Image (cartoon, rainbow, N blue to C red):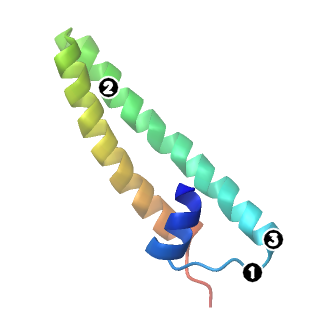
Amino acid sequence: MKYALDKRYIFRFKAQNVAHDAQTFLLYSLMGVATTVIFWGFEYAFEFWFQTKAWRYLGGVIGLGIGYLVKYRLDKKFVFKQQN
């Protein structure tokens, strides 16, 4: 669902055909996996460093924010790049 919404409303992207749309979705998914690692990294690093659930959650919030920013930029540059 998020892919369809991002594709249509955020990036205003139109795939050339079904194969191109599938390739775009695969790349979009891979970018999501990469940014999930950022989120988990912050979450677990904060828990490791500070040894409390509260700090873990703060790390999760920070990681989520950074992950979304990175995801947007990666999607804009590599996934939904403008066609000429």
Q: Position of residue 37 (x, y in %)?
A: 46, 34
Q: Is residue 3 left or right of residue 38?
A: right
For the point 62% across and 85% down, the residue is: 83
Q: Is residue 71 left or right of residue 27?
A: left
Residue receiving disc 2 = 43
Which residue occupies the extreme bottom position in the image?
Answer: 84
Residue 38 vs 1, above or below: the answer is above
Number of residues whose C-alpha sits closer than 10 Å to that of mark 3, classed few (under 14), some (14–19) or many (20 or more): few
Mark 3 element type: helix
**Amino acid marked by disc 2:** Glu
- Indicate which disc residue 63 carries: none
Residue receiving disc 1 = 16
Mark 2 element type: helix
Q: Position of residue 51 (x, y in %)?
A: 21, 8
Of residue 6 and residue 32, the one placed in the foreground of this image is: 6
Q: Is residue 49 left or right of residue 83?
A: left
As measured in the structure, the alpha-carbon distance from the residue carrying label 3 to the one carrying label 1 is 7 Å
